[in-house]
Image (tube, rainbow, N blue to C red):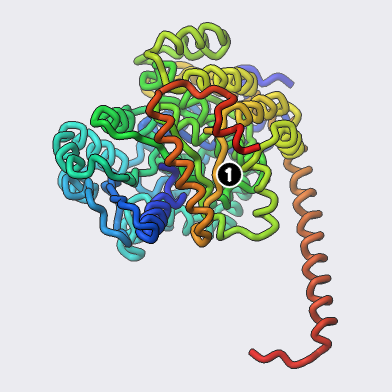
Amino acid sequence: MGPAGSGKSTYCQTIMQHCEATKRRVHLVNLDPAAERFEYPPTIDIRELITLEDVMDELGYGPNGGLIYCFEFLMENLDWLEEQLGDYEDDYLILDCPGQIELYTHIPIMRQVASMLQRWNFQVVGVYCLESQFVEDTSKYFAGVMSATSAMSMLEIPHINVMTKMDLISESLRENMERYFDPDPLLLAEDANRNTSGKFHELNLAIANLIEDFSMVSFLPLNIKDEDSIAYVLSHADNAIQWGEDQEPKEPNDPEEVDQD
Amino acid sequence: MSSGKASDTAPTDTVQGGPVNIIMIGMAGSGKTTLMQRINAHLHERKQSPYVVNLDPAVSKLPFQANIDIRDTVDYKQVMSEYNLGPNGGILTSLNLFTTKLDQVMQIIEKRAASTKYFLYDTPGQIEIFTWSASGAIISNTLAATYPTVVVYVVDTPRTASPATFMSNMMYACSILYKTQLPFLLAFNKTDVVSHEFAVNWMSDFEAFQQALSRQEECFMNSLMQSMSLVLDEFYSHLRVCGVSAMTGQGMDHFFEQIQDAVREYHEEFKPNLQKQIEQKRIKEQQQKEEHLKRLMDDLAVSEGKQVDL
């Protein structure tokens, strides 16, 4: 999940490639009716059920209305999805979702999909992708955090945030970004205060503290050219799935965080 | 100099003179375009005709006549087929193409600045194409650097009535606030359907909101939500709020009062901050240039003019 262009589909392809190399069975499920082409053909594709193009052509909807219609159609035809998924109960599935945040916040569609998956005994983790190029300074980083949490909070599944396109940013910027991955709230707040007017200082501190308390709100860097980076992100996703089983609210001092010391 | 009600204000009477850019941002279906039309009509009635810019390449019919329309510069359908893109990619690329002509747009705006007070900008229906794109950032930054700019975040009030959705929406608004760093006005639209009183209540009474939140079904992220609501509580102190109905026109006077207030904030807070940032950037660029130059000199010294095999 994530905004248009953040690298969701690329993430899927990268993980697919990585898993293939490590002999791990993984299947791609495409839930984006507007998607165009894939390097790895998806095992399950919503476009077999319905495509955005058809909806727009036949019903005359614009891109938004069309997308919503596609999902409402999916909701009415969930047995199709259930059937498709039936063969892959024990496998690792990656679901490539559309970017529009409206589908996560205002319309309960994605949430319904997530809870249906859980009801069918799947362990689910949400992966929210955000482009590193937008996170030029701390206030933009905060914006990213808020935006990610906004989308994820409605889904009620464990999630991880991934900062994509790390391979595309310069060395010095990459060093700069280190502090976002192992955040120290006071430093972050100070940093933000430098860039923003005085009115924001309280808010900066509040957000920085939030980031420290909840590891799920911080970002993991992803450099698709670095195998270690990919493995790292994947391991976090795996961890989250195991944790999701207990459905307990995340406590601030959870083992995952302690390990990071 | 008090601004009073919009109807009493003479065309060029702002707090500190000059035009105001109003950028309308909101989720798909929140009613941005309809609200733009309402604002447009309201201003026309008061003989303060605004200058209207449409930045949504995919809209089929606009209820108003736009002075500048992205659809004149870019043909969305053609972009999609020419570049083999899906609808999102099409909108984003259209916006990118438009942004390459931004300096021309700015020239037009500057020419009109003497006679027009309000410049209204309607953004693409899918909010992320504006908020998380390079062109969206360029457009809002450029506007903000020239004239007082206010971001109006349009909220679909009926759809935001549950505490979790409300919180999610507010978080997204907070994210936009951080990205643009501009004075913010939350316009709760469709108040003819559902009043925004609940929102005002939740925003001013933090405990009422927490209670409403906990009354919802047991949520996996409850502790995160509770902490997040603390953050949001802080966020609200930075916001202006108004309830409007694009359909009936209620709330428009208050809307404009808030805009004036936002302009004041722009002059007091954002402009000085902006200038500070521009200065910082200039210094950084200067430093980078010097570093580059130094590196180049070092390299030259090392190679000592030897031939380099390519």
The percent position of residue B188, horizontal first and vertical second, equals 46, 21
Picture quarter with the N terminus of chain A? top left
Depth order, front residue of B25/B209: B209
Which image quadrant is residue A198 in?
A: top right
Depth order, front residue of B66/A79: A79
Residue drawn at point x = 22 percent, y = 46 percent: A46
Depth order, front residue of A164/A102: A164
Can residue B141 be seen here? The reply is yes
A190 sits left or right of B168 in the view: right
A18 sits left or right of B231 in the view: left
Residue drawn at point x = 35 percent, y = 57 percent: A23
Residue drawn at point x = 44 percent, y = 52 percent: A7
The percent position of residue A248, horizontal first and vertical second, equals 44, 21
Q: Which residue is mark 1?
A: B140
Which image quadrant is residue A218 in?
A: top right
Give the answer, above or below, for where A174 lies relative to B290. Answer: above
Assign a secondary structure to mark 1.
helix
Total marks in image: 1
The percent position of residue B54, horizontal first and vertical second, equals 44, 44
The percent position of residue B222, horizontal first and vertical second, equals 47, 18
Residue drawn at point x = 77 percent, y = 68 percent: B292
Q: Chain of mark 1?
A: B
User: In the rendered structure, which amino acid carries the disc numbered 1?
Assistant: Ser
Can residue B72 be seen here? The reply is no
Q: Residues within 10 Å of mark 1 (few under 14, many from 20)?
A: many
Picture quarter with the C terminus of chain A? top right
